[in-house]
Image (cartoon, rainbow, N blue to C red):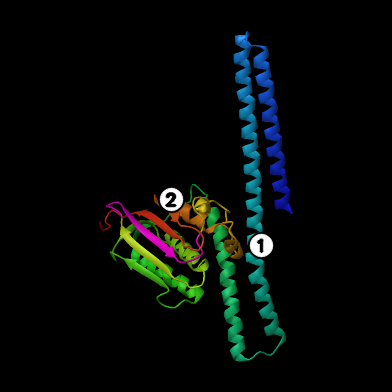
Amino acid sequence: MRVAGRRKAVIVFLILGICLVTIAVALNVGWILLNLREVALLVFGVVFFAIIITGLVLNTIFLIREIRRNEQHDAFLNAVTHELKTPIASIRLYLETLQRRDVGEEKRKEFYGVMLADSDRLLHTVEQVLKASSTREKNHLLNITDINLSELLRESVERVKIRYGLNDGVINLSQTDSDIKVRGDADELQTVFTNLLDNAVKYSDKEIKVTLAVKNLNEKFVIVRVKDSGIGMAPAELKRIFKRFYRVSSRQMQKMKGTGLGLFIVRSIIKKHGGRIFAESKGEGTGSTFIVQLPKAANGKS
C-alpha cells in the first residue's frame, strides 16, 4: 500500500511539474512577443524564466529521489524483519517440539541441525547490518597486513561450501600464481569474497557452478573474477546493484530473500582498500561475473 501511494505521489508531482513548466513557457513566450522592444525586460524575463524552470526541475528530482529512498528503506526493513523473524520462529518451534514430545535420537539430531542452520542465518543477517554500519564510518580502522590471496580465497570457498553443504568441484578455484599477496585487512576481505561466493550460489538457477579465477593485472594490481551460471541480470542493473538497500527488480531475484546490503558492503570494503569492483552480465538467464581489482603488497609477485 505504501509503495502504491508513493508511486501516485510521484505521478502527481510529475504532472504538476509538467503543467507548471508549460504555463511558464506560455507566459514567457507571450510576454516576449508583447515586449520585443524592451530589451532589458526581455533579458530579465529570460533569466527569471530559466531560474523558475531550474527550480521546478530540481524540486521534482529531489522529490522522486526521496520517494525512492523511502521505498528502499521500507523494503530493507521488511527484508530484515523477515530474515530475523523466520529463523527465530523456526528455532522456537523446534525447541517447543523437543520440550513437549519424546523425540528419538535420530530426529533430535535432525532438529539440532536445523536449529544450527537457522541460528547461522540469523547471525549472518545481524553481521550484515553491523558490517554495513561500520563500513560507513570514516574513522573505521583496518588491520592492514600482507595477505596471501590464494589462502584467503580457499578459506572463503570452504566457508560457503560448509554453509550450503556443497560437494567438491561445485566451486572451482583457478589461479595462475599461488603466492600472490595483497595489502589489506584479512577479515574485511574475507567478508568480500564470502559475500560474492554466497550470492553466486544463492542466485544460481538449477545447477550450481561457480568459477573463481585469480590473475595478475600488472605490477600493481591483481584481479579476482567470481563467475556463476545463475539467473543473471539486465545490463541496466549492473551499476545500481552496489547501492545500499538496492535489490534487482526481476521476479527471480525478488523470490530470493535478502537485505540489499551485501554488495554495498563489498564495494565499501574494496574502496577502502584502494580497489575497484564491477559486474558483467549479458541479461537474465546468462549468469553474472563480478570482477574485483585489488592492489598488491609491496613484496607481492608480478
**Residue 148 visible here:** no
> What's under tag 2, amino acid-wise?
Lys
- Tell me which segment is drawn in magenta: 217-232
Q: As displayed, is residue 239 above or below residue 83?
A: above
Q: Quadrant of residue 107?
A: bottom right
- At x 57%, y 53%, the residue is 246
Q: Is residue 222 magenta?
A: yes
> What's under tag 1, amino acid-wise?
Thr
Provide the secondary structure element on which disc 1 rests. helix
The residue that disc 2 covers is 272
Q: Quadrant of residue 148?
A: bottom left
Q: Quadrant of the N terminus?
A: bottom right
Image position, residue 276 (x, y; %)? 41, 51
Neighbour tally class for label 1: few under 14, some 14-19, many 20 plus, Cα within 10 Å: few
Image position, residue 141 (x, y; %)? 45, 52
The residue that disc 1 covers is 81
Image position, residue 87 (x, y; %)? 63, 71
Q: As displayed, is residue 279 above or below residue 12?
A: below
